[in-house]
């Protein structure tokens, strides 16, 4: 089974087009390292949390929208290789990142079920 790197980050609503363009530009770089899929999802029906929620997880501020994204890799080793090498790769160094990286969360996930 594949391996997933998931992301959750707040993005200013005014920066939606800029974020989309950044995602489009990042795809060839991730592909170069073996990513099979990149999916970017703009928050549409995000209800305020009381104990937990997307808004609370990223400390959402006025005018921001949570973005939930993932990269699918063939395996964990391929993902790990990308993360180890990307900091020295010029394709990643000059990338526009229109979000507050301090409030972004990400992690690796091993799929346990896939329904299609």
Image (cartoon, rainbow, N blue to C red):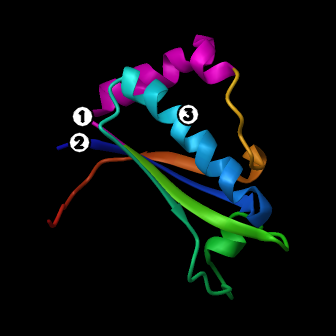
Mark 1 vs 3, N-terminal side: 3
Question: Residue tagged by mark 2?
Answer: 2
Q: Is there a contact, CB below 8 Å, between mark 2 and mark 1? A: yes
Quadrant of the rendered image containing residue 58 = bottom right
Q: Quadrant of the N terminus?
A: top left
- Could you tell me residue 103's position as x and y percent? 74, 53
Quadrant of the rendered image containing residue 75 = top left
Label 2 to label 1: alpha-carbon separation: 5 Å
Mark 2 vs 1, N-terminal side: 2
Q: Secondary structure at mark 3?
A: helix
Label 3 to label 2: alpha-carbon separation: 23 Å
Reply above or below: 70 against 24. below
Mark 3 vs 2, N-terminal side: 2
Was residue 73 drawn as part of the magenta stretch in this picture? yes
Label 1 to label 3: alpha-carbon separation: 21 Å
Q: Residue 25: give its label.
A: 3
Residue at 68% x, 58% y: name it: 16
- Could you tell me residue 46's position as x and y percent? 60, 81
Q: Which residues are magenta?
A: 72-93
- Could you tell me residue 49's position as x and y percent? 66, 85
Reply above or below: 57 against 47. above
Dot 2: few (<14), some (14–19), or many (≥20) neighbours within 10 Å?
some
Residue 61 is left or right of residue 70, and the answer is right
Question: Residue tagged by mark 1?
Answer: 74
């Amino acid at each position: 089974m594949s391996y997933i790197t998931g992301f959750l980050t707040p993005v200013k609503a005014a920066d939606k087009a800029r974020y989309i363009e950044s995602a489009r530009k990042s795809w060839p770089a991730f592909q170069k390292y073996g990513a099979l899929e990149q999916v970017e999802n703009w928050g549409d029906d995000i209800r305020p949390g009381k104990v937990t929620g997307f808004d609370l997880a990223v400390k959402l501020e006025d005018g921001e929208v949570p973005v939930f994204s993932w990269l699918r890799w063939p395996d964990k080793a391929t993902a790990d290789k990308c993360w180890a090498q990307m900091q020295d790769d010029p394709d990643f160094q000059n990338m526009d990142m229109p979000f507050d990286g301090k409030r972004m969360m990400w992690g690796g996930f091993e799929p346990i079920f896939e329904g299609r």
